[in-house]
Amino acid sequence: MSTLAAVAALRATETGRAERLTTVRHAHLDDHPFVLVPLTLAGEACAPLAALAGTDRERPTLLTVRQPRDRAERFRFTQRLAALLLPYIDQCRTAETETYTVGRGAEKEERRRFLRAPQLLVPGGEGIAYVRLLGRLTRLRAVEGPYAVDPSVPALGKWLTWFADRAEFPGSCLFQAMTRLLSAHWATGQSPAEDSHLASLLAWIDPPDGLTGAQAAREAEDPLRFPPAGPATDVVFDQTLHDLMSRYDEAGDGRGREAVGRQIDRELRGQMLPTWELVWRGVDLLRGLPEGGHVAERWTYDRRLFSEYTAYLDEDGRPQARRDHAVGAARRLARLEEAMARYDAERAFDDPLVMAEYELSGEAFTGLVVARDEDRFAPGPRPGSMVWRPTITVHSELPVRLTAGKEVKCPARPGQKAQIVEVVPDGEGHTVVVQLNGGFNRARKPPAPPGTLAEVGETVTYTSVDPKSMPSVLPAEEDTPWTHGGPPEPYEPTDEDAEEIWE
Amino acid sequence: MPPQHPVDPPGSRLAALRGPRPPQPYTARKITALTANPACSRRAVLDAAGVDKALLAQRMGYEPRFGQSPFAIAREQAFEALVKWGGYAELIRLLREQLGVPVQEAGVTDLNAVGGDTSLTRRAKETRGLLARLASGSDERLILDRPLLTLEVAGQTAHLEPQALTHRVGGKFYVAEIRSFPAIDGQANPTAVAQTAKQAAVSVLALHRTFEELNLDPEQIAHEFLLICPKDFSNRPYGRLVDLRQELDALRFQLTRLRRADDLALALPPSATLDTDRDVDELDSSVGALDASYTPDCLSFCEMARYCRDEATACASPTRLGGRVRNTLPGVDSTRTALAYLEGVHAPGPAETAAIDQLRAAERLRRLRRGGAA
């Protein structure tokens, strides 16, 4: 946690309400997110118990397993979940497409991507782990042979695994946990461990009338009013459920059994409905924030990845391996690091409150333009040549820790490369001379086209953080050198995978 | 059911504090909790006195939300029964696979009870006797099912029950722990594994002490334990040897740091009581007189945590906001003081100046840059 976030948390303890960490929303929220509130049976590796799911806030679909130890019932559950999620994904696949180009010069290529992509929302981080497990469990199943399942089951598994993989990438909004989204935008006066409880987190952000966030958060811990957001269930509720399930087993076939079954459904629905409401309240609160500048661009990338994965499923369609191979893991790690750096930089560019963190750490400064030299020429790369390099002089009231020679950029003019020429102490702060190395709409001599050169009196921010920094390039998978084991073998699911026991 | 409780030494101050209720056993779980938060005198004394913390918390108005689901218990028992079935056939199979040595069938001694007697002292004595025989004699193939070991911790005798202790395999005795969390594609939940490893380390340490007392060679004790859990989504047992050297070192170090619980209890006034049948106000003042060291992590394992949390909130302890906020406030023991520094009401001392200057700079930037964000 940054110092600014720590100050925000301190303030929250004082005001009794969550404090904003950002001025804008840094995540894409789809018009039609697919919300999933799952429950599992305690003590089991991955035994789905129930779920509320769907895109319609008013009419969630209830899925339950009345006897979770029955393997057939579990697969019926996954089949029903697939019958909800796969059509939702298909809607995005049949949406309109747009064309975009990748590469340059001879390698330039036109591709198409869908205008929509699915967005899956779960209440908390454990929900993401659950989806990963359920994906692992179902994607390797065979659709024919001794333990055949419905074709929708492995299809669901592949998609769930894909979602869970994307959830690890900072900035990707294909699959998000509501608690993570909310704590990225608000600081509460409680610990991160307590923030992982959706009800108390929302209590801090939006307390009911007459209560402070702290009081409301305590009340939200009452499992009777706000059952755990899952997938783990409340221990006391488990006792009730245990009794009901025993009665269900004992009841003979027929109406008695059906009646107990319906009671189980009702109880399970009661455990999930408050969480369902809370997730949607979180959606409302986030929609209330204005969207950050790079959000649409990141969602475009998400749409591209979605389009690529649908194409992969159509052409190849093999499930993800049990384990990453070494090359894939290295590649993935590199991508994760890039995504993190890019996401951090983009957020700073979109949001002065996030940029403030870099100002505090000395990687950025903000100040008033006090002078500018539009007609300055400096020695160019060739001996004796002179190139047009105007400067602006910025006065910052806070000390500046960037030094001369550093390359910087201004979020207001992200296409303009700049370099610090001089930093001079001035009162408590510093005066900085910044040389502009381009970004004048191709002009090579004064005057600067309107808007490209900061005016005197304008407030500008410069930072050494750059969202457009070049990512590291790894060789293509098929070009993996022999030192690294050569091109990796793709994963083929085995009979053993398909016959894996699920008890 | 015959008595299962440990017996107090006569005239013990801790026993007097607890009152007439029988003491709760001092378990591996309590030792690991104490070593996780060694600064917590409250938990140290409550555990040493054998107070039922869940009951105490409930009496003081903080119903703890722990306990085990009937589903989890059923699964645990079913899995344990499966591993133990057929004279620990699965355990022997896993040992053979993991150690790469031929391990043959072995006899099993059930130490859950000795001749129908489940008392801790009797079981501990029987375990010691068997250990003396097995470790000094020839290679007798005998698996101890639920042996009972003892360990002195902070002046108290803890009773430890590893699920099983193998006979000498390749010259070493192995502790085995059976857990019902799954290992999926060879990976189990790291938190659960770490927790189990700590508990196994306590057993191994107790085994070391017992061997020393019996003048046996402690080199015969393996510094690894066999973790047995279900494979993937099935019930099939899967086992791995987990190295314990790091846990053992950490545990030994933490145990030397622990102050004796009786010394901690001496700080209490003579009228203090931890008897759960007494008046709530009396309990409250006695519990309050014991220093707690609350961190948000306590919420996940300690029955008293929510009581301590309210106390920490009342005195505005920065620790209650989590480690990361705490770390931005070195030397500041209250968030109210920190806020007063921010407002400029108080001037920080020389030790805090650097941290507070940074906070003030952050506060100023926050004010300047937040714009319309309320």
Image: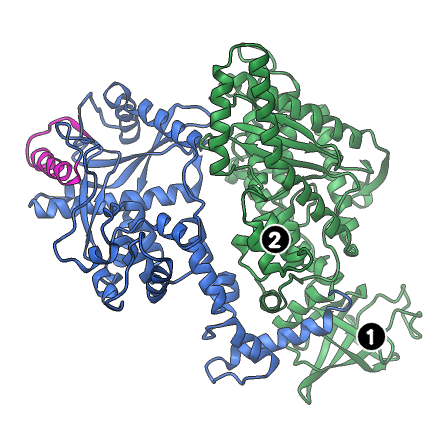
Chain colours: A green, B blue
- Please say if A181 is above or below A232: below
Q: Residue furthest front?
A: B279
Q: Is residue A443 left or right of residue B320?
A: right
Q: Looking at the image, can residue B117 be seen? A: yes
**x and y, in percent, of residue B345 in the image:** 58, 84
Residue A232 or residue A410, whichever sits in front: A232
- Please say if A229 is above or below A488: below
Sequence-earlier tag: 1 or 2: 2
Q: Which residue is label 2 attached to?
A: A201
- The kind of secondary structure element at disc 1 is loop
Residue B143: in magenta span: yes
Q: Is residue B174 left or right of residue B140?
A: right
- Magenta span covers which residues? B119-144
* Residue sitting at x 74%, y 39%: A33
Label 1 packing within 10 angstroms: few (<14), some (14-19), many (20+):
many
Whole-number angstrom distance, CA of label 1 to CA of label 2: 51 Å
**x and y, in percent, of residue A372 in the image:** 84, 81
Chain letter of disc 2?
A
- Res A389 label: 1
